[in-house]
């Protein structure tokens, strides 16, 4: 019989939408000591779940996704059950949790510090990921969740610094220096490069009891209070069936002033990559767009945030997925967009 789990380090990687959290986690995984098994729990505001598809399956890494809400409020009870199952099934040496970009971490910290995980988990460094360019928007600096993520963080990793001007970078560092409590460290993390030593830290922690809270997230947690019965919940309970070929499954959601529109397609449905990239690129610039697609050029991962676009190969083969996130009332017409995607698949069939 295996020994009971004890003091597994857990780290939160927070940050607003499109800040580069998943990229930074990838770079941390690249530094994982040989012989260790890590677990990554990814929460997405969107309904279909894209970020999990960005990680390749391997024996020493377990990645689980929880789309469709916020671990800090709507999914808090589901997260607890999922995490208990993940810990005891896979017995990781280290756990990394990526909350939704719209998530307030205080509620999540309460769960991790609760009786269910006493002696099992040890709260490690909380890292906030920040794109310096976002501070150019006064609405970001005033956004409650944005500020709370940075307030609760032990340290801040400045990403997208190659796209920011020297003035934007200096302004971000000056603004962060004025936050209270003071950050233990602020460092540049180009292309998500962050030393694992930063994540491990020196073991000194701020009391969770001093964490700030968010009125918006508190209301959502209270609204979700009836979902506290999680006995018998297992990871497979959150699996969803594949859509039928040619009949995508559409998902929508709205909370915290933002809305999400997403689709899942059967893996046999294929897209014309050139036209797909054109359609996605023509969406309004303020929208967060990410997806994984089976195309006529193979499986591709598309990611657009803060004006930067990447298109890379993808190891994900289970289905095609798209997620579009923006402020409520700003998303494109779902019916028209779905019709466009049908045309893209039709173009692929003609080529073949």
Image (tube, grey):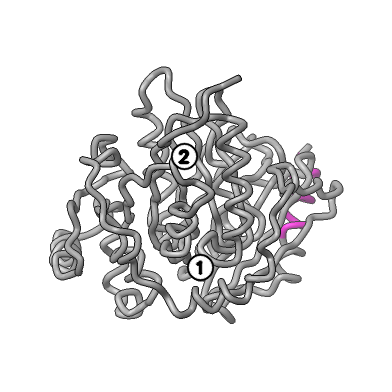
Q: Choose between 172 and 348: the one closer to the eye.
A: 172
Left or right, residue 203 beside residue 88: left
Report the quarter where the C terminus lies.
top right
Question: Which of label 1 and label 2 is nearer to you?
Answer: 2
Question: Tag 2 or tag 1, which sits nearer the N-term?
Answer: 2
Report the quarter where the N terminus lies.
top right
Which residue is located at x 29 percent, y 52 percent?
Answer: 159
Provide the residue designation for mark 2. 120
Relative image position of residue 258 (x, y in whole percent): 54, 74
SS assignment at label 1: loop
SS assignment at label 2: loop
Give me the C-alpha separation between circle 1 and circle 2. 39 Å
For residue 287, which numbered disc appears in the image?
1
Q: For the residue carrying disc 2, how many other residues have a C-alpha within 10 Å: few (<14), some (14-19), or many (20+)? A: some
- Say if the magenta span includes residue 207: no
Magenta-colored span: 341-351
Relative image position of residue 115 (x, y in whole percent): 50, 52
Which residue is located at x 13 percent, y 62 percent?
Answer: 170
Relative image position of residue 248 (x, y in whole percent): 79, 55
Left or right, residue 38 beside residue 271: left
- Say if the magenta span includes residue 348: yes
Which residue is located at x 53 percent, y 49 percent?
Answer: 116
- The answer to whether the residues at label 1 and label 2 have Cβ atoms under 8 Å apart is no
Q: Up-down: is 114 above or below 2?
A: below
Which residue is located at x 81 percent, y 47 percent?
Answer: 241
Q: State the image quarter where residue 152 is shown.
A: bottom left
Q: Up-down: is 126 above or below 286?
A: above
């Amino acid at each position: 019989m295996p020994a009971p789990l004890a003091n597994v380090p857990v780290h939160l990687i927070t940050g607003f939408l499109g800040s580069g959290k998943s990229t930074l986690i990838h770079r941390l995984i690249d530094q994982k000591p040989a012989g260790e098994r890590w677990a990554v729990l990814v929460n997405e505001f969107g309904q279909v779940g894209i970020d999990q598809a960005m990680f390749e399956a391997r024996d020493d890494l377990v990645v689980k996704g929880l789309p469709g809400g916020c671990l800090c409020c709507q999914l808090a009870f589901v997260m607890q059950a999922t995490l208990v199952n993940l810990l005891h099934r896979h017995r990781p040496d280290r756990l990394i949790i990526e909350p939704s970009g719209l998530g307030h971490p205080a509620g999540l910290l309460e769960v991790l510090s609760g009786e269910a995980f006493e002696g099992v988990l040890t709260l490690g460094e909380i890292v906030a990921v920040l794109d310096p360019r976002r501070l150019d928007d006064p609405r970001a600096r005033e956004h409650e969740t944005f500020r709370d993520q940075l307030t609760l963080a032990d340290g801040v990793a400045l990403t997208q610094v190659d796209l920011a001007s020297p003035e934007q970078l200096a302004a971000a560092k000056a603004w962060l220096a004025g936050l209270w409590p003071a950050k233990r460290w602020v460092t540049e993390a180009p292309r998500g490069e962050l030393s694992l030593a930063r994540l491990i830290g020196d073991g000194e922690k701020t009391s969770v009891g001093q964490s700030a809270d968010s009125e918006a997230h508190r209301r959502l947690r209270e609204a979700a209070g009836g979902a506290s019965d999680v006995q018998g919940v297992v990871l497979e309970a959150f699996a969803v069936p594949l859509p039928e070929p040619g009949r995508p499954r559409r998902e929508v959601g709205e909370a915290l002033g933002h809305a999400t529109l997403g689709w899942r397609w059967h893996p046999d449905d294929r897209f014309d990559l050139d036209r797909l990239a054109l359609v996605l690129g023509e969406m309004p610039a303020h929208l967060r767009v990410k997806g994984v697609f089976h195309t006529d050029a193979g499986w591709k991962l598309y990611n657009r945030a803060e004006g930067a676009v990447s298109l890379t190969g993808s190891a994900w083969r289970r289905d095609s997925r798209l997620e579009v996130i923006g402020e409520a009332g700003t998303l494109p017409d779902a019916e028209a967009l779905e019709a466009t995607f049908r045309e893209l698949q039709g173009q692929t069939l003609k080529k073949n």
